[in-house]
């Protein structure tokens, strides 16, 4: 299944709509927080609360089962900066998840920690590492997890 993972759009609603149009074949859209808008305006996106989200329709974390995989979605602002990867991996294990999608740092990131895939798609509004704004394509099937980052310099 092709899954589009975004985070930290901070009110850039035009980008969210453009991404939906760009990927009509995606089976799922995940937003890892800091939408800064009401999620009801973005049907099809599974959204979690970020540290800048004040609307009441958000959950702090979500678990999404896809086949034999379980995706843990969080913004990650409640995890320590210096041990975030380890803490996210531990939380995923406690929830029986093998993939974590998270945001907050505004930096695209992919790693494996103790068998857990950690994916931060970066930011749709302002990257903090000198690269263009980004999001990720997570393609999963029963046997493989593939990730491709999409960097968009015009945003």
Image (spheres, grey):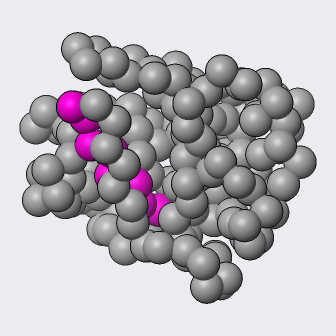
Question: In the rendered view, does 87 fall on the left or right side of 127?
Answer: left
Q: Is residue 129 above or below residue 136?
A: below
Q: Which residue is drawn at the image coordinates 40% and 39% (left, top)?
A: 119
Main secondary structure found in the magenta portion: strand
Q: Which residue is drawn at the image coordinates 71% and 24% (left, top)?
A: 23
Q: Is residue 43 magenta?
A: no
Q: On the image, which quarter does residue 79 sit in? A: bottom left
Question: In the rendered view, does 112 fall on the left or right side of 15?
Answer: left
Q: Which residue is drawn at the image coordinates 88% and 31% (left, top)?
A: 154
Q: Is residue 121 above or below residue 3?
A: below
Q: On the image, which quarter does residue 22 sit in? A: top right
| Image spot of residue 122 (x, y percent) | 57, 43
Q: Is residue 73 magenta?
A: yes
| Image spot of residue 74 (x, y percent) | 41, 60
Count of numbered marks: 0
Question: In the rendered view, does 100 fall on the left or right side of 138?
Answer: left
| Image spot of residue 55 (x, y percent) | 67, 82
Residue 43 visible at all? yes
Residue 128 visible at all? no
Quarter of the figure with the C terminus: top right
Which of these two is toward me, 65 or 136? 65
Which of these two is toward me, 110 or 61? 61
Q: On the image, which quarter does residue 137 sit in? A: top right
| Residue extent of the magenta highlight | 68-76
Which of these two is toward me, 140 or 128? 140
Question: In the rendered view, does 3 fall on the left or right side of 98?
Answer: right
| Image spot of residue 136 (x, y percent) | 56, 31
Q: Extreme top residue here?
A: 143
Q: Which residue is drawn at the image coordinates 33% and 18% (left, top)?
A: 141
């Amino acid at each position: 299944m092709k899954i589009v993972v975004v985070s930290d759009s901070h009110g850039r609603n035009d980008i969210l709509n453009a991404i939906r149009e760009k990927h009509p074949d995606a089976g799922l859209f995940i937003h890892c927080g800091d939408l800064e808008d009401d999620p009801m305006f973005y049907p099809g996106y599974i959204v979690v609360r970020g540290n800048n989200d004040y609307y009441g329709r958000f959950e702090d974390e979500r678990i999404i089962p896809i086949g034999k995989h379980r995706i843990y979605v969080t913004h990650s602002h409640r995890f320590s900066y210096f041990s975030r990867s380890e803490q996210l991996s531990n939380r995923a294990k406690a929830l029986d998840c093998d993939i974590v999608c998270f945001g907050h740092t505004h930096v695209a990131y992919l790693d494996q920690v103790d068998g857990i895939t950690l994916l931060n798609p970066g930011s749709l509004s302002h990257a903090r590492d000198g690269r263009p704004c980004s999001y990720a394509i997570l393609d999963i099937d029963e046997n493989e997890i593939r990730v491709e980052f999409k960097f968009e310099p015009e945003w």
